[in-house]
Image (cartoon, helix red, strand yellow):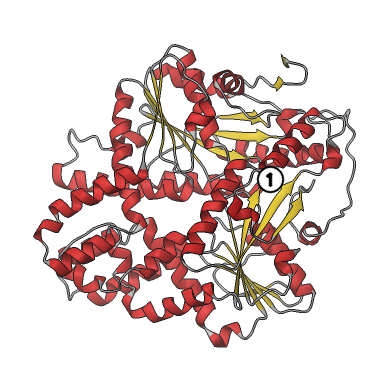
């Protein structure tokens, strides 16, 4: 593996959810430790399952993994880190500043930006604490800081005085207010990230066009801020040996190879590795030891042994959705689980039944027009242009709050409005405008990946609290209230039948419930078990899915649907209708089966 050749002290694994970065990070840690190196494995993922992978309780303390000599692990809890960060900022000013100012600071520190900064605050110590880092030959991070986080850290540090003087309360002033005291430490951490002698960034992807486009954006974003030592790992590539006598495997293989040949040029220039799709779950030491090797032991499953699975379709969920006549349908989940396609399928099925539908997306990486590849009566399609909405919001803030500031204050406000959080707030405002239509028609929202979605919900909650505070609860219907009412809003959580996606969907469900929002249904997408494969490798993966499907059906979901892994991409209105009804299209035989 190229990414393991002469590895530096720090290795960061990053990528969309579900691509396997935790498994690869764990497998790397084991390989280096068993080669005689002293290794610390650190997870900064809010849905970390490192402990589950090793079957050990880890938590926010360095824990020795006795099953592997020289290996230690640490799971940073972002929520606990955020609370400690808030306490550190608010406690010194409580009783010193007016109570209204303290409440304003607490409100601004309640968002997801604060959580992201706080997590970075935790692991900067691991990058800059020489006494700690010399204890380990390698420190491996499962989940790297995003370009979003690093850009926040690079903003000017004079926010405390700006906030205390009441000159503004724009998007990220709360999180940034406490950064000045640690700015030198953050600078040292960012310098370490940008030093190829100390740090290597491994971009993990799957052989899928959308995933490769996303990782190309990540590469360019991080390269633009100085993180140039990047490697690419394509995980879960189906071996060519599996294509014989299995039309499903052959179609998947061709699709993956086409995606690899057409990957963005910026990725082709990176040193890269491919890891073959494994037939087993990557949990436990034996499985992880086999992950980075080319040959593995396989147990053949008899092709004539049936896999029995109840597979209710998306169409069965739509049957219940139409009972209310109109409303908001939101599809949520981590990146890479297929929300865009499923949102389009739900919208097409509703429109096909003669109902007026507005299909929209707040995901900057989504391509609804490509997925639909046509038009349909009763269906209108839109996307929220984040750049245009952000510029509109920036100008509005500058024309109102900025008009009262002196030149220095306006310069600080303009700088703050260039932060990524400004985009989240602007997108939320556009989102709010669209969901008002749900009182008269169906609005189907393809939301952004989970992290962005939660930022939208933070903004929704802030709007809700502000509206109630100013107008009282009587007669006020805010977007949050609309989302909390199952008669008005139905949230579909999208996942894959794999350990990490199900875990993250369950965590998202818990976050929604804390906000008073109850998910209406779960959708398990791209199920191998539901596709009835013949390939030995795919049949073993199908068997492995059954445990995760069982967990969703009996532990997490009130209602659910299962969408099979398809031989052909579900592009176009007719294919999307087939997907909604679980009709499997066989291109080779030109028939539906």
What crowding class fits label 1: few (fewer than 14 Cα within 10 Å), some (14-19), or many (20 or more)?
some
- Residue drawn at (14%, 46%) of the image: 470
Viewed as shown, does residue 505 lie left or right of 276?
left
Relative height, residue 215 to residue 546 (above, below):
below
Viewed as shown, does residue 271 lie left or right of 401?
right
Q: Which residue is mark 1?
A: 260
Q: Could you say which quadrant of the image residue 82 lies in? A: bottom left
* Front residue of 476 and 32: 32
* Front residue of 563 and 5: 5
Residue 423 pos. (x, y %): 34, 50
> Which quadrant: the C terminus?
top right
Please say whether residue 342 is visible from this viewpoint: no
Please say whether residue 557 is visible from this viewpoint: yes
Residue extending furthest toward the bottom: 131
Relative height, residue 182 to residue 485 (above, below):
below
- Residue drawn at (20%, 67%) of the image: 163
Residue 14 pos. (x, y %): 58, 59
């Amino acid at each position: 593996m190229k990414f393991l050749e002469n590895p530096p002290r720090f290795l960061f694994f990053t990528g969309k959810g579900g691509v396997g970065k935790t498994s690869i990070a764990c497998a790397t840690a084991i390989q280096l430790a068993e080669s005689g190196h002293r290794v610390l494995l650190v997870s900064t993922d809010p849905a970390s399952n490192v402990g589950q992978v090793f079957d050990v309780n880890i938590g926010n303390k360095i824990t020795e993994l006795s099953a592997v000599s020289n290996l230690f692990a640490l799971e940073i809890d972002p929520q606990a880190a955020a609370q400690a960060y808030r306490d550190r900022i608010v406690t010194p000013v409580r009783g010193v500043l007016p109570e209204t100012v303290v409440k304003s600071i607490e409100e601004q520190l309640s968002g997801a930006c604060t959580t992201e900064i706080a997590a970075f605050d935790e692991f900067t110590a691991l990058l800059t604490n020489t006494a700690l880092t010399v204890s380990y030959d390698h420190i491996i991070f499962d989940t790297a800081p995003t370009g979003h986080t690093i850009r926040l850290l690079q903003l000017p540090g004079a926010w405390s005085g700006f906030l205390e003087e009441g000159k503004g309360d724009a998007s990220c002033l709360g999180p940034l207010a406490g950064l000045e005291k640690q700015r030198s430490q953050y600078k040292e951490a960012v310098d370490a990230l940008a030093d190829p002698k100390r740090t290597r960034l491994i971009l993990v992807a799957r052989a899928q066009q959308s995933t490769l486009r996303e990782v190309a954006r990540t590469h360019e974003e991080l390269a633009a801020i100085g993180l140039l030592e990047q490697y690419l790992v394509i995980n879960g590539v189906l071996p060519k040996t599996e294509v014989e006598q299995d039309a499903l495997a052959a179609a998947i293989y061709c699709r993956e190879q086409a995606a690899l040949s057409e990957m963005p040029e910026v990725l082709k220039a990176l040193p890269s590795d491919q890891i073959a799709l494994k037939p087993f779950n990557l949990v436990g030491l034996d499985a992880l030891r086999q992950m980075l090797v080319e040959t593995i032991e396989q147990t053949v499953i008899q092709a004539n042994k049936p896999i029995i699975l109840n597979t209710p379709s998306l169409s069965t969920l739509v049957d219940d959705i139409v009972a209310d006549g109109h409303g908001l349908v939101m599809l949520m989940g981590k990146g890479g689980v297929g929300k865009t396609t499923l949102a389009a399928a739900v919208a097409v099925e509703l429109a096909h039944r003669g109902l007026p539908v507005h299909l929209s997306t707040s995901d900057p990486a989504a391509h609804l027009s490509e997925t639909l590849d046509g038009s349909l009566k009763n269906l209108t399609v839109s996307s929220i242009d984040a750049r245009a909405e952000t510029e509109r919001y920036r100008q509005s803030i500058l024309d109102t709050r900025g008009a009262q500031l002196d030149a220095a204050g306006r310069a600080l406000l303009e700088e703050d409005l260039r932060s990524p959080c400004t985009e989240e707030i602007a997108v939320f405002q556009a989102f709010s405008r669209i969901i008002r239509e749900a009182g008269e028609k169906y609005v189907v929202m393809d939301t952004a990946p989970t992290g962005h979605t939660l930022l939208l919900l933070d903004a929704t909650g802030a709007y809700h609290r502000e509206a109630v505070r100013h107008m009282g609860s009587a007669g006020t219907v805010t977007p949050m209230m609309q989302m909390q009412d199952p008669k008005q809003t139905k949230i579909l959580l999208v996942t894959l039948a794999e350990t990490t996606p199900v875990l993250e969907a369950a965590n998202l469900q818990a976050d929604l419930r804390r906000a008073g929002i109850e998910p209406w249904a779960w959708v398990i997408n791209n199920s191998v078990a539901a596709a009835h494969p013949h390939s030995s490798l795919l049949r073993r993966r199908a068997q492995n899915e059954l445990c995760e499907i069982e967990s969703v059906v009996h532990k997490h979901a009130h209602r659910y649907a299962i969408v099979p892994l398809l031989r052909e991409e579900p592009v176009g209105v007719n294919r999307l209708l087939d997907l909604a009804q679980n009709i499997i299209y066989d291109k080779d035989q030109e028939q539906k089966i």
